Image (cartoon, coloured by chain):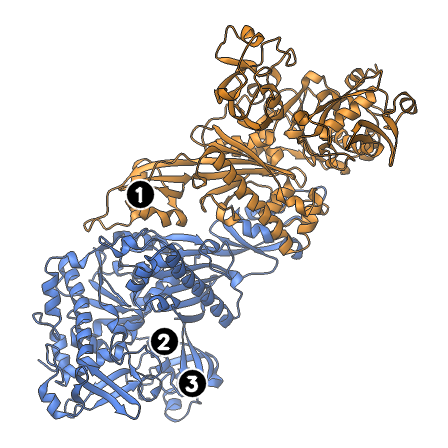
Chain colours: A blue, B orange
Amino acid sequence: MSGTVVFQPHGRSTEVEAGETLLEAARRAGVEIESTCGGELRCGRCRVVVLEGSEHLSPAEGEELELLRDAMDMRLACSARVQGGRVVVLVPEESRPEHTSRKELSPRRVEVEPAVRAVRVEVSPASLSDQRDDWSRVEEALRSLGIQAVPELEALRGLSDELRRGGWKLTLLLWGDRVIGAEAGEVTPLGVAVDFGTTTIAGYLVELTTGEVLAASSILNPQVRFGEDVLSRVSHAMGGDAQAKELAECAVLALGELVGELCEKAGRKPEHVGEMVVVGNTAMHHLLLNLPVAQLALSPYVPAVARGLAIRADELGVSGLPPASRVYLPPVQAGFVGSDCTSVLVALEPELGDGVQLIVDIGTNGEIVLGSRHRLLSASCATGPAFEGAQITHGMRAVKGAIEGVRIDPETLEPRLRVIGGVVPKGICGSGIIEAVAEMLRAGILTPSGAFSREAEERSPRVRRGRDGYEYVLASGGDTHVAVTQKDVRAIQLAKAALYTGCKLLMRRYPVERVDRIILAGAFGSYISREAALMIGMLPECHPERVVQAGNAAGDGARIMLVNRSSRELAERLAREVEYVELTAEEGFQEEFMNAMHFPHAVDELPTAKRLLGWD
Amino acid sequence: MSGTVVFQPHGRSTEVEAGETLLEAARRAGVEIESTCGGELRCGRCRVVVLEGSEHLSPAEGEELELLRDAMDMRLACSARVQGGRVVVLVPEESRPEHTSRKELSPRRVEVEPAVRAVRVEVSPASLSDQRDDWSRVEEALRSLGIQAVPELEALRGLSDELRRGGWKLTLLLWGDRVIGAEAGEVTPLGVAVDFGTTTIAGYLVELTTGEVLAASSILNPQVRFGEDVLSRVSHAMGGDAQAKELAECAVLALGELVGELCEKAGRKPEHVGEMVVVGNTAMHHLLLNLPVAQLALSPYVPAVARGLAIRADELGVSGLPPASRVYLPPVQAGFVGSDCTSVLVALEPELGDGVQLIVDIGTNGEIVLGSRHRLLSASCATGPAFEGAQITHGMRAVKGAIEGVRIDPETLEPRLRVIGGVVPKGICGSGIIEAVAEMLRAGILTPSGAFSREAEERSPRVRRGRDGYEYVLASGGDTHVAVTQKDVRAIQLAKAALYTGCKLLMRRYPVERVDRIILAGAFGSYISREAALMIGMLPECHPERVVQAGNAAGDGARIMLVNRSSRELAERLAREVEYVELTAEEGFQEEFMNAMHFPHAVDELPTAKRLLGWD
């Protein structure tokens, strides 16, 4: 038995196991809810409003009722358990933690001003004394509303019949000044925002008259069958036109499926979708559009095109939506800094702040942006997929059975595990491996160089020699065996060194000694333990309170660009203004990288990391 | 053995049998060449310049050399016989008859100012110190030439590779401000003008930098398999979406084939075709675009759309040319007055004249326009296909073996026949049947009511009772039997009455007593005997010298709109300004129609017709 929880106004949804609390569901969905007591039913701050499906929640009783005496129409997220079905909750302003409130990060309100709109017209009927063509009647009616429009062929194909079916009344779907659809009845135009990730494609169905998110869904990027990582897909595409087309076609097919799924969830028609906004890294962007990738894969790594593109759905081949509806792809920044990063900037607007912010978006690649209103720098760090749990001995995606959190008792070296779904662990996901390594460091199992400590081997049977050298056993017994190996630690060292080096080189180029805030964007950034990230030296020096988890900011930026077309100009400007830094061409890159391999760092002070590790 | 003759500056071409003269070929191509002596090698006025293929012509000798003493670089069209191969001739200004000179009909010179152009750019190479995307480099180069352009996805797909292949030099193909193609080498952009007839689709390949016609070709409209006439195709399309799609697809396929054929003829690449201009009657227009036709077929007979449309080749599905190249369809005027008529107006510009002109374009339908700079009226006459030789007992298309001209000796009632290809006659084509009926009238074989004369039956065995009533035998013997039957005469009577009634009602509406000029447009109008047309009372009173044959004016208008994009604004204005008259709704239609059934007319004077018939 499982259920779905949708969080508003975020518009994010997640699947839950029966028995999970709303607070746990929120965490999974990347939605932050204030909780001072840590979910122990003491502070009463995690208040939410249940909009739909209250019958699917465990009843409120005892302590919860007590804490809600002044707000009996609410529930506490840490206490209400989902028993199945679909639940929609609103996280009110006061229950959102200060540091991730959209208001603070994105002071510009998103005005509802989409590229797509529906216009209702009534026209004079055709007769022998008025034999004008049908379009002229419609054009006249539009003009009387002050609208100059150009019809798309596909809209004209349906216009005559719908006009007569509706008794000379008609709803027109417009994208800019283009008429892309015509329907006898009333139409509420829809849009879809898509974060087209290397592994996961996340989509949001948005009502364009209100900006409301009606449904959220995510599917596996079917291109994975051509390779898990970006590079193997790019080389597949370079194998010939047919192979490149194959990659594009399966990506386009996935977009169509996603739209279908979203519309089914929300009970809406795909024919009313007037626009999609799709963001992704530059390789995904090019592979989706079947643009050439050879020049992207080889030095000097340039995109075929960086500017934003609006492409007809039928030209791209996306099925289900109106053929003349548009797919807008915001500008990419460079060969390794994609439109997902542009989208993050639109969502977070670092250029509006006085302080210097560091935005870190970790997908399969680590894209980072450093800046303020004075200057923006971007770079791509070759972190590889280790942070996502790939290339880790017992690595797995963040699904049921994955260890996502680890605490190690420094005395006994015994671990406490947090497993998704609360079942017997099957492996470890990205956030789990980082926390495991951080805790192994703190407990002295690992030395600053990343080697296993002999002393720890003597203290605990969990530290032992496995097939491939030392390992630390997180769980074992029966079929279960999950351990962190020396190889895994090396993979994390390489990944964190790549990220840290990128941040450092951007800071040097800016120049700035210390950043005022670090924003972790992306799904991964939402689940990761900020403390663990600081402990292993992934991030430059920063107070943990100033490390902010922004959720799927790329998806959110796509939603903003969907709802507000003038934000696309912002996107174009930001993409143009950001200075891309080719890290490997920066002076001292090699040395910095080597120093960053150490935990937390060979040279840099990183007092916060040391404090958290208990090394100060 | 046969050959091809291309006439410049008309750009028309025709196939010829070996041995035919250039003058005969010109007539077939609808190109008029001055010839006072009627092609008898006496006046020396039919001078032409041979641009290509002089080796394929019979040598100049005797009388021809004498007549050309002052112009030894020319040939006389009546004397030079084609022996095969391809011959290109220029008809100089002085050899074009006054009344059909383009100059007189179309005083506006066609400036070469197409929508498509090729622009050569050189860009700065990509390097690690300049990692901008490829398009930005191209955009910068274009901007330095003062061009602001937007790239189409399809052009971007080829851009990166071509840029590198060309050593950072590139030719861009632009349609307006759209970049629709990119190629490393030099490109001369091409266009195709198409007259999309119910029976025949004629195409002209045009070099867009010069406006020169490189090749002409025509193919059978493959939609004929769904019905010879417009109405049966329209009802097929009304049978369901699949059937409508079937009609559209075969039409689109034919366009692709035509382009391929034209390019092969001229030795050019279809990838360099940046635009097609396609004109046709409203039903053909709608069926090609797969627009709905139900409202077109039923009263009040309105088009789905009248305005001009520019559609991407890939949206329409035309193969061979660049996917982002455009197909421009000029505006139609009404349900039964198509863009072919608009195109005729662009070519002939009646609105520039002071005198009142009557333009008659006979295809399967008869479209007529009456007007001057003061006013333009249009109408469609339901002539049916009789004028094209269809529904005529021994009717056939104007191909080899068709009787295209008839003279009857009033004394003996013996005919002299002109047969296409000079072979034994197999049937009679449209111009032949009209001339036959006119001559039968003049010789007294037919009475003014269209009945066969008993007296003629007594005078000649050629007038006899056949299976279906009376007939006049044009040719017989062996397998040969070609006759004009009573049924054929009735068909011609109905067709000519429809046309005459249309002309008369428009003149009444205008109002004007007598037109200053009649212009016969269309292939049919080029071959028809003006005298015969006047004799049977197809046309209102007019001096034969003032009846002008304008050739394929619809095709020529398409060429003009292809070469000169501002003429499209003229087309939009003309299509909007022409007042469409629904003939059947005009007062007195029935009575006028009945009166016009008579030869030449029951009531109207028509002195010219009577003089030609010898009845005055």
Relative to B228, is B104 on the left or the right? Answer: left
Quarter placement of the C terminus of chain A = bottom left
Q: Where does label 3 land, which residue? A: A82
> Quarter-wise, where is residue B302 in the image?
top right
> Quarter-wise, where is residue B46 in the image?
top right
Q: Residue placed farthest to the front in the image?
A: B478
Quarter placement of the N terminus of chain A = bottom left
- The residue under the point 26% across, 65% down is A365
Q: Where does label 1 land, which residue? A: B138
Q: Dot 2, how many residues are within 10 Å of its Cα: few (below 14), some (14-19), or many (20+)?
A: many
Query: Where residue A427 appears, x then y in whole percent?
Result: 29, 83
Q: Amino acid at mark 2?
A: Ala
Q: Considering only vertical position in the picture, is B412 above or below A458?
A: above
Residue A555's tag is: none
Q: Amino acid at mark 3?
A: Val
- Mark 3 lies on a secondary structure that is loop
Q: Where does label 2 land, which residue? A: A29
- The residue under the point 67% across, 41% down is B335
Q: Considering only vertical position in the picture, is B393 above or below B513?
A: below
Do circles 3 and 1 both sit on a common chain? no
Q: Considering only vertical position in the picture, is A488 above or below B39?
A: below
Q: Nearer the viewer, residue B245 or A25?
A: B245
User: Could you tell me how far apart the alpha carbons at marks 3 and 1 are, in whole angstroms?
Assistant: 56 Å
The mark nearer the N terminus, 2 or 3, is: 2
Q: Considering only vertical position in the picture, is A94 above or below A463?
A: above
Query: Where residue A253 appears, x then y in whole percent?
Result: 45, 63
Q: Nearer the viewer, residue B560 or B145?
A: B560
Relative to A502, is B477 on the left or the right? Answer: right
Do circles 2 and 3 both sit on a common chain? yes
User: Could you tell me how far apart the alpha carbons at marks 1 and 2 are, in whole angstroms?
Assistant: 43 Å
